[in-house]
Image (tube, rainbow, N blue to C red):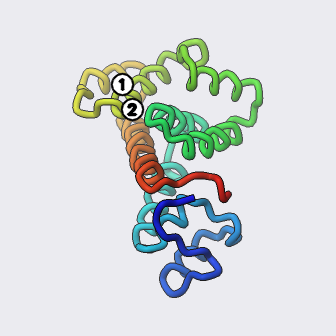
Amino acid sequence: MVWIRITSPQDARGKLAASYRKLGAPPARLDQIILAHGERPHTLDGHMALYRAVLHHRDNRLDPAFAEAIGVLVSRINRCEYCLHHHLRGMVRALQNDSLAEQWIAALLRGPLDRVFSQARVLALDYVGQLTRAPCEVTEILVEQMRLAGWDDGLILEINQVAAYFAYANRTVLGLGVTSDAE
């Protein structure tokens, strides 16, 4: 369900039809967050470009499972059930280890993080939590702590961008009433 008008892939014409086709998914498999962009296909193209660059670009060095974990944490903090469930599944797929996935899920949803994640990853997740809850209160000290724990500036940027992308996606979903009911 979406609170604004959506255009199904079967009814899409012109630029929207082209944008849907570029996704390469069978029309029946397009997620509601994709369909929510139907009134402005250029925003769909921008959303997908950002999503791919932040989470799936070949030059990214951040572990894909950890990137998904960041998305899970941001979505939990923002209470975005849609993104939370989608990216929990993505994290589990990326981990390819059911036992480890259960541990990560428990830590991300209920804590404590340090039972499952390394000190470096806990610092990164603390940064992500701070950035999500109160971005104006993030300080250079947090970034320096991440550096001291072994994150280089490129990885810190990737962590920042994954958290920022999920803040955007969560607000798109929550602000337009996107649910997985029709998926």
Nearest the camera: 25 or 181?
A: 181
* Quarter of the image where one finds residue 34: bottom right
The amino acid beneath tag 2 is: Asp
Image spot of residue 92 (x, y percent):
69, 37
Task: Kindly indicate whether the residue at mark 1 contacts the one at mark 2 (C-beta within 8 angstroms).
Answer: yes
Of helix, strand and loop, which one carries label 2?
loop
69 lies above or below 147: below
Crowdedness near tag 1: few (<14), some (14–19) or many (≥20) residues, C-alpha within 10 Å: some
Give SS at disc 1: helix
**Image check: 161 left or right of 138?**
right
Q: Is residue 124 left or right of residue 135?
A: right
Q: Residue 152 carries which label?
A: 2
Q: Indicate the amino acid at tag 1.
A: Arg
Tell me residue 16's x, y (percent). 51, 79
Where does residue 32 sit, x and y in percent of width and height? Answer: 57, 60
Quadrant the N terminus occupies: bottom right
Residue 84 vs residue 131, the one in the foreground: 84
The residue at 50%/51% (across/down) is 59
Question: For mark 1, what is the residue?
Answer: 147
